[in-house]
Image: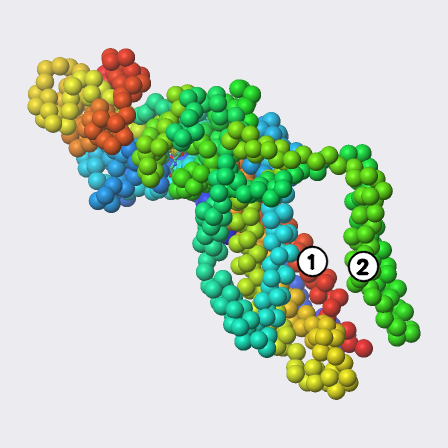
Amino acid sequence: MNNDSNAQSSKASLLYDPVARSIFFQCLTVAIVAWLVYAGINNAITNLEKANVASGFGFLSDRSGFDVSQSLIEYTNDSSYLRAFYVGLTNTLLVSALGIFFATIIGFAVGIGRLSQNYLIRKICMVYVELLRNIPLLLQLLFWYKAVLGVLPNVRDAMQVGNIYLSNRGLAIPKFIPEAGASTIFWAFVVGIIATFVVAKWAKKRQMKTGQQFPTILVGFGLVLGLPLLALIVLGFPFVIENPELGGFNFRGGSVVLPEFVALLLGLALYTAAFIAEIVRSGILAVSKGQTEAAYALGIRPNITMRKVIVPQAMRVVIPPLTSQYLNLTKNSSLAVAIGYPDLVAIFSGTVLNQTGQAVEVVLMTMLVYLFLSLVTSTFMNWFNSRVSLVER
Amino acid sequence: MKTKIFTGMLASAALALSASTASAATLDDVKAKGFVQCGVSTGLSGFSAPNDAGEWSGIDVEYCRGVAAAVFGDPSKVKFTALTAKERFTALQSGEIDILSRNTTWTMSRDTQLGLNFAGVNYYDGQGFMVRKALGLNSALELSGASVCVQTGTTTELNLTDYFKANNMEYKPVVFEKLEEVNAAYAANRCDVYTTDASGLYSIRLTLDNPDEHTVLPEIISKEPLGPVVRQGDDQWFNIAKWTHIAMVNAEELGVTSENVDLEKDSENPNIKRLLGTEGNFGESIGLDAEWAYNIIKTVGNYGEVFDRTVGAGSPLKIERGRNALWTDGGLQYGPPIR
Ligand SMILES: N[C@@H](CCC(=O)N[C@@H](CS)C(=O)NCC(=O)O)C(=O)O
């Protein structure tokens, strides 16, 4: 608003002032929403009391009394419901993070494959996308679970490679139990990553100045893998290996990757990859052909053209819908309950809700977790998007 | 995907916002609707499962028909809602169903913290273990290290933990929400053991490909009194739920069956007269007509008849009366007197 309109409005009645009116209506809307929320919460509390249903969050510190098949953190049936909540949360995070990782790789490969010059590759990628995109995820999960369980042998006839066993009870692998000094290896890995960033920055600067290129990727690999390896050798392998052994009904010792986990990861990654493939394809097609031709005319090789000209521009189109797919994958992981993977929904909205009967509290917490995860993911992707978006000079 | 969370959300929203379901007179609602909405399991034969003709059948189903007969004089005025273990209490609390009759164990926390009332015990059960005969096991104490299939949201899940802990044994839980999923996982050998109420095990065993390859171990590790449940805050409906079961038990004790009930109407036995409404006004005192119990017995039968044709000798399950025999035969079924 400029001075002019201010001067005018002060003369006319406040009722006809657009600014005053808009402020009034916005305040009114906020007030109504606030009242609705308040009334809803109030009503919920009164009704729960009237129905004699226990309420409040006190139950979170009670003993859970049930066991869980997979836990990344220390958990027993003597732990609290809150601890069970964290077990579910970490299991959801694990499968979501790995799912996003694999879905991205497969999705990019298939998306680029759909634009391949090779007829067979193009068609295979097309069939993949159309098949997986058009079958409900739940059915796919049940299919993978049946397939995983159906194909794998019973524990007693487990397939064996060295100390690794595969059966319908999962993949039993040796467990590395860290001894003193083992954390150094992790820190070496972290240092490797930081060093790679520093090198990359330096290499870019140098290239800007002198035009000389530096094999950043190769050196990066060397640092990230080499430093921990060096630490490992210097420390003389500070791990005790515990091999899985068949005893009684199951494998004892070692670590076990559950078939439920594998089926869920497989289902989520393959399904989401089909959508990502289409996003990648559309992103690449959105870059006009003139860009390629211009790059070629400048004598830039096809490989470099793809990496330095096409992909950076395609990324601008790809990232926003890619974010949605990442969010979908995380939320879809709640289908785990159908195939017995102990994710947040299965453990917390399932078992805990049922044993405590505190539906309102439990569902509220579960929803907030998914909301929080989604907001974190989209914040990160928005930040990434602003990094790669076209900087106009 | 989100649907799971979404239904949970809706359910709890409905629970939170359903203004007066808890205190409203359920009987009036039921009469206005014209039927009783009864929550049952998704398919546990003998208790509640659709039969070959597509009709619900089983001991829990018959009980609900009994309630409909008491209220309307017509056992068909009932509609069934299939519920998993996890869904059942929310469905009852939110008013989606009028009564829950779904092999539900009466426990203190359910009776006190969930705003529910248990209306009696129509089947005394206990938790057991089923294994493949090929494993050559004789006792549940040999199960250390086994993978155990179990359904979520049940007392089963907790008893299992307690039992293994008390006996210093380890196990690996494999937990599913739906009955079919547990069945499929056990059938695929994902787990060595299937655990639930012993009656449930007998029923599930018959649905497996080769029932004879499976056996139920002798240990019964818990008390599972199964019975119908209603919401707190409606004593009239609670009374109807209680006395429907009691009427069926007392009818058996008095020898009144669906076949002889018309003859018994002329009986001189004052107990039978009070039961069948030819003396006193007991029907009126629970808000029904004098024929309430007569209608239950005439159309559904007494407890013994129902037991026999759903889970007992006259059914594929062939479960013995055992603890569910009348107290006069050394069992636990004991109906308070109508007087
Ligand atoms: N009596 C136990 C367990 C009842 C239960 O849900 N049993 C399972 C296994 S036999 C069942 O009936 N499932 C049927 C279904 O989910 O539809 C309880 O009340 O928690």
**Residue type marked 1:** Thr
Q: Is residue A202 visible?
A: yes
Quadrant of ligand 1 in image? top left
Q: Which residue is mark 2?
A: A220
> Where residue B315 sits: x, y (%)?
23, 31
Among the 4 quarters of the image, the one containing residue A244: top right
Which image quarter is the C terminus of chain A in?
Answer: bottom right
> Does B22 appear above or below B17?
above
Q: Which chain does tag 1 point to?
A: A
Q: Residues within 10 Å of mark 1 (few under 14, many from 20)?
A: few
Residue at (11%, 27%) from the top-left corner? B259
Amino acid at circle 2: Gly
- For the point 21% across and 40% down, the residue is B76
Residue A110 left/right relative to A177: left
Closer to us: B199 or A25: B199
Q: Position of residue B217 (x, y in %)?
A: 40, 24
Picture layout, residue A265 above or below residue A355? below
Residue found farthest to the right: A210
Image location of residue B212, percent across then percent down: 32, 32
Label 1: element kind? helix
Q: Chain of mark 2?
A: A
The figure's colour scheme reads: rainbow
For the N terminus of chain A, give its image quadrant.
bottom right
Q: Which residue is mark 1?
A: A379
**Residue in the picture at 72% in, 75% down:** A303
Q: CA distance from mark 2 to mark 1?
A: 27 Å
Q: Residue at x 62, y 57 (%)?
A: A102
Q: Secondary structure at mark 2?
A: helix
Residue A184 in the image: state x and y as whole percent.
82, 42
